[in-house]
């Protein structure tokens, strides 16, 4: 059976990341890579996301890197066309590149933003299309990720996996030991 994993999490500004050079992105990507490898080795064949800036774009970058060593596919499904129209130029370019390199790219709605219903429909679509979700989120401070989590949390046949702040602290320590460097959150 094909196993599909949805990945989501914070937007950069929700975790006070305002630069693509922020060292914390390396930490988040390392944590994502560890968890994604684990899920791929347990049978995940597709990793899907809407390509939202932050955790979703970083996860997509990690998946593209993992495709060199693992048999895994990346699907990017933004809620509507021109999803990135209000984003900074460098993030629009990154989203475009990832969309081009993905195994499947398809906006869920034709046309531009019409209303919040598109995001609710996106969350429901991801729930229906995947059998598990990996969410980088602190339940005490869920940010916009709360909307997706609220959609999936009561589903019996949908496994929810978290990357927590505690896990990120462990990753910092692991990276520090591996690289013999000092990383701080």
Image: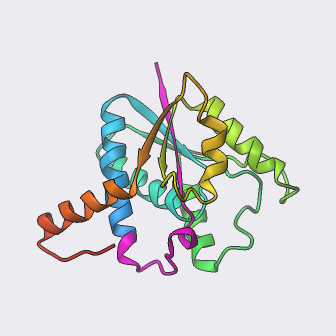
For image coordinates 83% across by 59% down, the residue present is 113
For image coordinates 20% across by 63% down, the residue present is 173
Rendered image quadrant of residue 81: bottom right
Rendered image quadrant of residue 183: bottom left
Where does the image place residue 27, in percent across and percent down from the top left? Answer: 33, 65
Nearer the observer, 19 or 71: 19
| For residue 62, side relative to residue 177 (left or right) | right
Where does the image place residue 68, in percent across and percent down from the top left? Answer: 32, 49
Q: Is residue 64 above or below residue 92?
A: above
Rendered image quadrant of residue 161: top left
Where does the image place residue 179, in percent across and percent down from the top left? Answer: 14, 69
For image coordinates 82% across by 53% down, the residue present is 116
Q: Is residue 133 visible?
A: yes
For image coordinates 50% across by 69% down, the residue present is 15
Nearer the observer, 103 or 9: 9
Where does the image place residue 160, in percent across and percent down from the top left? Answer: 48, 36
Given the current orientation, which residue lies at the most extreme right position?
114
Q: Which residues are magenta?
A: 1-24
Nearer the observer, 114 or 82: 114
């Amino acid at each position: 059976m094909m196993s599909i994993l949805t990945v989501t999490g914070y937007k950069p500004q929700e975790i006070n990341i305002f630069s693509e050079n922020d060292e914390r992105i390396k930490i988040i990507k390392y944590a994502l890579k560890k968890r994604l490898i684990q899920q791929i080795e347990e049978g995940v064949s597709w990793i899907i996301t809407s390509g939202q800036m932050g955790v979703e774009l970083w996860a997509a970058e990690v998946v593209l890197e993992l495709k060199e060593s693992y048999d895994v596919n990346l699907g990017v499904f933004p809620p509507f066309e021109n999803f990135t129209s209000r984003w900074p130029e460098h993030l629009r370019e990154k989203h475009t590149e990832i969309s081009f390199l993905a195994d499947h790219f398809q906006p869920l709605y034709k046309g531009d933003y019409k209303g919040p219903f598109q995001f609710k429909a996106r969350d429901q679509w991801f729930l229906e299309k995947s059998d598990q979700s990996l969410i980088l989120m602190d339940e005490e401070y869920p940010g916009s990720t709360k909307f997706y989590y609220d959609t999936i949390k009561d589903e019996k046949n949908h496994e929810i996996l978290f990357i927590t702040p505690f896990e990120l602290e462990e990753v910092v320590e692991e990276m520090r030991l591996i690289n013999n460097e000092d990383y701080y959150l």
